Every structure is written in structure tokens, then in C-alpha cells.
Amino acid sequence: MPDGLNTSSRSAIGRPLGVFRHRPFLIFWIGACISNTGNWTENAAQSWAVTSQTIGNPHQGLLVEILQFADFCPVLLLALLAGVISDRVNRKVWLITLQALACALGAGLAVSAFLGRATPWVVITFTFLEGIIWALNGPVFLSVVPSLVPRAELSPALALNSVQFNMARLCGPMLAAALIGTIGIAGAFTFNACTFLPLLIALLLAIPNAPAPSRSKSGSIYDDIREGLKFVWTSPGTRRLTIMGMVFMFLAAPLQGLLPVFAQSVLKGGPGLFGLMLSAIGLGSILGAYLLSCIPAYYPRHHLIPLAMCVFAAIGLLFSLSTTPALSLIILVASGCFWLLSLNPSNTANQLLATDANRGRVLSVMLLAQQGGMPLGHLFAGFLTRYMSPPWVLRLMLGALLVVMVAFLFVREPAIDAMPHRKLGKLTFWGNFWEAITAHSHRPAYPAEIGVSHERERTSV
């Protein structure tokens, strides 16, 4: 059993700042935070560029969702291959190569904007090309963190990694709004291109120049992909995480994809409001990281993840009903909080369930499920906007998400925490509901005979 799988969220990030004493992780964290700030700045500018150029166009919602689809659809095509590459190559060299290419594409988009050529389809094309880089980058970028800290500190390191991503998510859209208002779209794109330089320096200084991970045998790319898929599907914990991640990202996608349309058409705002809406989600994610540290030590991830996804869906339904900017911003802060509580424990569980030899492939399946489900959700939501208003698209998809996640909340999978199934006796509906939310049977004071009977079952097998 992998170390620390049944530790709590609190033990994972109770004192996270201590991880910064590892200098390579600190350098990597700072570089990634700066670069991600640029990425979120560009992301907001791309969305607003397409939205502002399609005012009055009946296909505005579809084009905005096509932009989001272009950003994430390369994951559908390349995620599994990216995982195999991550487990075969020198990760430092591969990361530097990919980030240099992303920097060049960001600079190309900025030049197009300065020349007045950043039409919606040009922006979508650059977004698709950058999506290819991010699809190849995802597994290897996530695989780097375990090489920078001891395994015992992996959970707080991953939590801090999520914090920097969401700090960037908070600051990037606000910077985008300021740059668009003063310099224009081109200024936001230029800022993003410049933020790759600190990350490239951090990769050169912090990442160990290690050879490819050792492999027990050499095989074809197809064999490696099949081995990774087999591990994920035959392990109950990773299988459940993959299914929940794909369903969640598919049905939750329009809450973010349709934000610029909500800002302009529903809330009657401009780029400033749109930037605030994206930043509100980022602020909520930072609050979610703090809330994660306050969760009791006994509370397991296999309860937390579906519960957080349920609450996220309910909050999204409230957002679809709001017509005032202030209330919408408050709701988006709450949605960002439960977005993090849904995905951060999922990512941590996947990292801990994976081995060093197959980490890249396991994480690539996770990314395929999450980031692959998102573009399909964006595309589906864009299709629905042709037949119903954006608020009703949200109500339909997030209502479905709420129903599905309630089912997962009642039918839990303890293997997510490397825990065996427990027999709790016959519970009423409300007793099962209370157990699903509170994880009462995992409290230290819960009757010991549950654990004893369970141990007898294991020894008798």
C-alpha cells in the first residue's frame, strides 16, 4: 500500500509552508506562479477578444465555446501519448523544450494582435496550437513535483502547487482587464509571452537533470499506453477517480466557458466585470485551499470529493438564476472554493496511488478524463446555446451533474484512500445520507468492533 494514502487532508496541508525549505521546489513554485499568471491573463484576453468581436452575432455563444474546445481538445488526442513520453524521456529537457515552444506561440499571438490580425478564428487557431503544447506538457509537469520533495511531503507540495495556480487564476484576469483597458488585447498577449522567461529559468535551476525513469522492460508505445490504462481501470480507486473526473468536467464546463457571455449579455458588463468574475473563481479556490486544511483528520477523500462536486453543482445552479453582478461574484467565489475541494483531493489521490514507474501514464489518464471531458462539455454547451439561453444551458448541465454526484456520494469507493470497504450495518436513507456527508464511521471514537470485524474478514480471505 502506498505511503500516506489514508492520511487526511489536514495532515496533508496542515503546515504547508514548511515545504518551501526545499529550495528546488520553491524556485519551481515561483516560476510556475508567474507563468500561470500570464496564462490566465492570456486566457481571459482570448475569451474577451472573441466575445467583443462577435457582438450581435447569433453564434456568439458557439464561438466562445469553440474557443474553449480548441484549448482543451488536444488533450483528447494526445494525453495518453504524453503520459508515455513523460515516463520515457529526460523530464527536464522535455519541459524546457515545451515551455520554449509555448513562449514562441504566445509571442506570435501578440504580434498578430499588434498587427490587427487577431480575428476570432486566428485567436482560436493559436489557442489550439497552444493546447497541443499543454496536452504534451501536462503529465510531465505534474510528475516533476514528486522529484522536488520527499514523498512524505508530497501532499502539502501538491496543495501549494494548487494554491499558486489559483493565485494566478485570481491575479491573471484582473491584469487582463487592466491591460485591455489601457493597452488593448495585444498588451495582455505580450505580458503572457514575457512570463515564460522566469519559468524557463526556474526549470534550468530547479529541476534535476535525471535520465528517464527506470523501466522493467522495453516495449512499444502501444504497450505502454495499454499498461497505463490497465492499471487505472483495474485499480478501484483510480477507476472511480477517472469516472468522476470526466463526468464532473464535462457537465461543469459551461460555468466557466459561458462566463464572457454572462458578463456581457446577462449582467450587462464589460471586460472589467469579466475579469472580476474569473478572479472571483480564483479567490474562491484560494479560500478552498485554506478550508481544505481545516477538514478534520479522519475525513477521507472518498467522501470529500463527491460531496464537494455536489455542492459545486448546486452553487452553479444558483449562479444561473442571478442577474446582479455583486451576487454573481459572491456565488463565483463559492464555486471556486468547491472547484478546488473537488479536484485537488482527486489529483492528490491519483499521485499517491501511482508508482514512480507509471506516474506519467496514470496522470495522463487523469488529465484525459478531466481536461478531455471539459472540451466535450464546452462543445456540447455551445451546441445547446443554439436552442436555449445560456442560463438554461447551465441549469440543464449542472442539474444533471448534481444528480450524478449525489449517486456517487451514496455509492462510495474507499479504495480512493486505499481503505477497504466497511460494513456499517443496515442504515436508513437519512442515516446513509448523514454518513455520506459527515463520514461519521471514520471518526476515531467510532465503535472499534467495525474495524475488528473488518480485520477478521481480511484474514479469513
Image (spheres, rainbow, N blue to C red):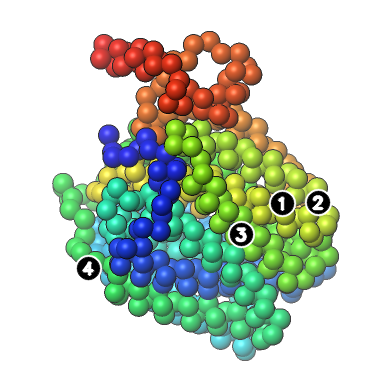
Front of the two marks 2 and 3 = 3
Closer to viewer: mark 4 or mark 3: 3
Sequence-wise, the earlier of marks 1 and 2 is: 2
Residue 457: x and y in percent read: 32, 13
Mark 1 vs mark 4, foreground winner is 1
According to the image, label 1 marks what residue? 331
Which label belongs to residue 322? 2
Residue 168 seen in the figure: yes
Give the left or right position of residue 21, taking residue 239 as reference: left
Can residue 66 be spotted in the picture?
Answer: no
Label 1: which secondary element? helix
Instruction: Name the side, left or right, on which 161 lies relative to 214.
Output: right
Label 1 to label 3, Cα distance in Å?
11 Å
Tell me the amino acid under the disc marked 1: Ile
Residue drawn at the location 61% of the way across and 23% of the way down: 433
Q: Residue tagged by mark 3? A: 283
Give the residue pinned by disc 4: 209
357 or 315: nearer the eye? 315
Name the image quarter holding the C terminus. Answer: top left
Give residue 342's position: percent from left, percent from top: 54, 44
First of labels 4, 3 by sequence position: 4
Residue 431 image point, x, y percent: 60, 18
Q: CA distance from mark 1 to mark 4?
A: 44 Å
The residues tagged by marks 1 and 2 sit, at their Cα atoms, a distance apart of 9 Å
Q: CA distance from mark 4 to mark 3?
A: 35 Å
What amino acid type is highlighted by mark number 4?
A: Asn
**Quarter placement of the N terminus:** top left
Q: Is residue 27 above or below residue 396?
A: below
Q: Residues within 10 Å of mark 1 (few under 14, many from 20)?
A: many
